[in-house]
Amino acid sequence: MQFSGQQPNSFTLSYILQACGTTQSPRETRKIHGFIVKTNADNDVIVGNALIEAYVGSHMVGCALSLAKAMSNRTVITYTMLTSKLNQIGHHKTTLEIINHMRDDELPIDGFTVSSFLSASANLGATETGKQLHCYSIISGFCRWTSVLNGLIDFYGKCWSVVDAQKAFHEIFEPDIVSWNCLMHGFATNGHTTFALSTLEDMRLAGFRPDSITLLTVLFACNRGGLVDMGVEYFHSLRVRYGIEPQLNHYNLLIDLLGRAGRLEEAASVLKSMPFRPNASIYKRLLQACKLHRNVFLGEETARKGLELDPSDLEFYALLAGIYDEAGRYDLGNNICRSMEEAG
């Protein structure tokens, strides 16, 4: 485009920046930022918002916040996008700090930002903040928004008030898949496994197709309730019936479910059958089960495969040493500890 003498407009730059954020390309984001400053395109609020989004997507939160602070034309949309993206990468505390920035800018907190703030409160266990946001949503009229009510279901479910989560659910005129998943997760979090699984059946009767989040929530519920066979059955039946393709986090939960129950060979078989390469987290999950049930042979094999991914990950050595200690092989455990000390 530049070779032909044309300069990219704000929409073109936005699309390019969106791609940078999606692919987590900090170097490219910086290069485009330099071009934007050079061409004075940073005065465009659309470009500014897209640049902030790209920085957050590339996990460069400091750059994103500095840019937002420097923008003279930031709007509610700027903060709405920023809070949503910060939540996605787990920066929940930073998300809640945006409340003060919006107050300083005398910008109204809309329903979208309320939803983001509720999500952050839920994940932080910030009970008082969440309740204040609930009051604000009632006063401002946002408590009729499905996204806000979904946020309240999630918040109360994670903050040990499943009754209030149910109340929020029943206030929704037309619950969506997010509503059902949040309610199901709330029951599971609070140890109400039977209610969580009955919510799945209610959801299906209401005409909703379970999605990948549903499968994750069902596995979580079965894990909390110790329902091993049922968890395995749901894992296979939901993927076959609804075409859900399990991802790493699904396999992680399934392996944890089997491992806690002492079905280590099944857990190892699931790990081997995965259609993609296991990550360190899954190997560590199986190692923890080996430690719990003192399975030295499988523990050694699992640690070896995990260390092939990252030989410098000391957690594998620590877990293996723990397995030896649990099995009474203190000599081997001490050898591992010495090796860790020598490795620094």
Image: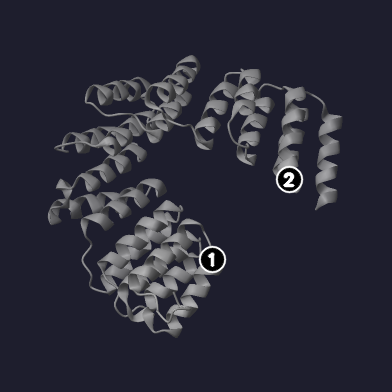
Exactly how many numbered labels are in the figure?
2
- Frontmost of labels 2 and 1 is 1
Q: Is residue 113 left or right of residue 294?
A: left
Residue 15 vertical position relative to residue 277 in the rendered view, above or below: below
Determine which residue is flagged by label 2.
314
Q: Position of residue 82 (x, y in %)?
A: 36, 62
- Viewer-proximal residue, 201 or 135? 201
Q: Residue at x 48, y 69 (%)?
A: 62
Amino acid type, mark 1: Pro
Residue most extreme to the top: 229
Residue 243 vertical position relative to residue 237 in the rendered view, above or below: below
Q: Is residue 208 left or right of residue 318?
A: left
Q: Position of residue 244 (x, y in %)?
A: 42, 30
- Secondary structure type for disc 2: helix
Tell me the crowding category of disc 2: few under 14, some 14 to 19, or many 20 or more residues within 10 angstroms, Cα based.
some
Tell me the crowding category of disc 1: few under 14, some 14 to 19, or many 20 or more residues within 10 angstroms, Cα based.
some
Mark positioned earlier in the residue sequence (2 or 1): 1
- Viewer-proximal residue, 202 or 260? 202
**Mark linked to residue 163:** none
Residue 186 vertical position relative to residue 313 in the rendered view, above or below: above
**Mark linked to residue 26:** 1
Q: Residue at x 82, y 26 (%)?
A: 329
- Viewer-proximal residue, 275 or 66? 275
Q: Quadrant of the N terminus?
A: bottom left
Q: How far apart are the two marked residues, 2 and 1, measured between alpha carbons?
A: 28 Å
- Secondary structure type for disc 1: helix
Q: Residue at x 71, y 22 (%)?
A: 294
Residue 5 lies in quadrant: bottom left
Q: Is residue 242 left or right of residue 254?
A: left
Residue most extreme to the front: 4
Amino acid type, mark 2: Leu
